[in-house]
Image: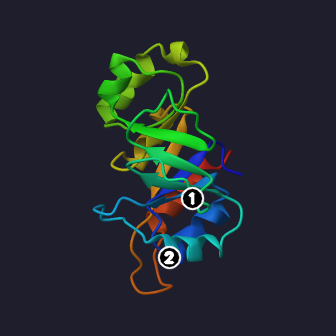
Amino acid sequence: MINRSIIAQNITNLSDARYFAAWGIDYLSFNGIPDSPYYIAPEKAKEIKDWVEGPRILLESNALEFTELADGHILSNIYQSLPLNKEVFYRISFQDILKGVPPSKYIVKLSEEELLEAKNLDLEKYLGCDFYLDSIGLSINSFENWPEWGLVVQGSEEEKVGLKSFEELDELYEKLMPV
């Protein structure tokens, strides 16, 4: 089993959803932001969800959308004063961390330089926080430098329906497996 929590984001096809579910990831995320290149219609997301077992489903949106499709949300705005009845992750920047953020669950895309800097920060003040490192753009070869935070991996287009190569993700999967 994988040694950390993982979110597979921007799922747009069943091939990705089934592949990541077979990994044993914790979350599949569908993008419900209409102007996003990863947008997926709710009907198609539900269709994919119905074929997959295991991961919890997240809906990325610009506002809280209470829908039966998702077990939780990925949001770009921090809603601390609202009573939230579903799990919520907030997509923030490294600069937000430097300014200070309240305890919650965060997704942060870091460059390799920011990753090194983040490892030196006293993140103990965020006890109770789960940081999910967006691994897109970071080299798999630098994996040993990654903190024990959760990871976010990216879905992508199929070459044709039902046909897709997962070579790069297979390499990451191997590195995530305990020795």
Instruction: Give, as a three-letter code, the residue at label 2.
Output: Lys
Q: Please rate how many residues cluster around mark 2, counting C-alpha atoms within 10 Å: few if below 14, some from 14 to 19, many from 20.
A: some
Residue 67 marker: 1
Residue 3 spot, x, y in % from top left: 66, 43
Q: Residue furthest bottom?
A: 161
Q: Please rate how many residues cluster around mark 1, counting C-alpha atoms within 10 Å: few if below 14, some from 14 to 19, many from 20.
A: few
**Relative vertical location of residue 5 with respect to residue 118 in this rendering, above or below:** below
Callout 1 touching callout 2 (CB < 8 Å)? no
Q: Nearer the viewer, residue 110 or 113?
A: 110
Left/right of residue 13 with respect to residue 86 in the rendered view: left
Tell me which residue sits at (66%, 70%) in the image. Answer: 52
Q: Nearer the viewer, residue 160 or 47?
A: 47
Q: Secondary structure at mark 1?
A: loop
Q: Mark 1 or 2, which is nearer the eye?
A: 1
Residue 5 spot, x, y in % from top left: 61, 44
Q: How is the image coloured?
A: rainbow
Tell me which residue sits at (43%, 33%) in the image. Answer: 78
Instruction: Give, as a three-letter code, the residue at label 1.
Output: Thr
| Quarter of the image with the C terminus in it | top right
Q: Secondary structure at mark 2?
A: helix
Q: Which badge, 1 or 2, is on the more N-terminal residue?
A: 2
Residue 165 marker: none
**Relative vertical location of residue 110 with respect to residue 16 in this rendering, above or below:** above
Tell me which residue sits at (36%, 45%) in the image. Answer: 138
**Relative vertical location of residue 72 with respect to residue 159 in this rendering, above or below:** above
**Separation of residues labelled 1 and 2 (CA atoms):** 14 Å
**Relative vertical location of residue 176 with respect to residue 106 in this rendering, above or below:** below
Residue 17 spot, x, y in % from top left: 56, 68
The residue to which callout 2 is attached is 44
Tell me which corner region of the image, top left, top right, bottom left or bottom right, holds residue 84: top right
Q: Nearer the viewer, residue 107 or 19?
A: 107
Left/right of residue 60 with respect to residue 129 in the rendered view: left
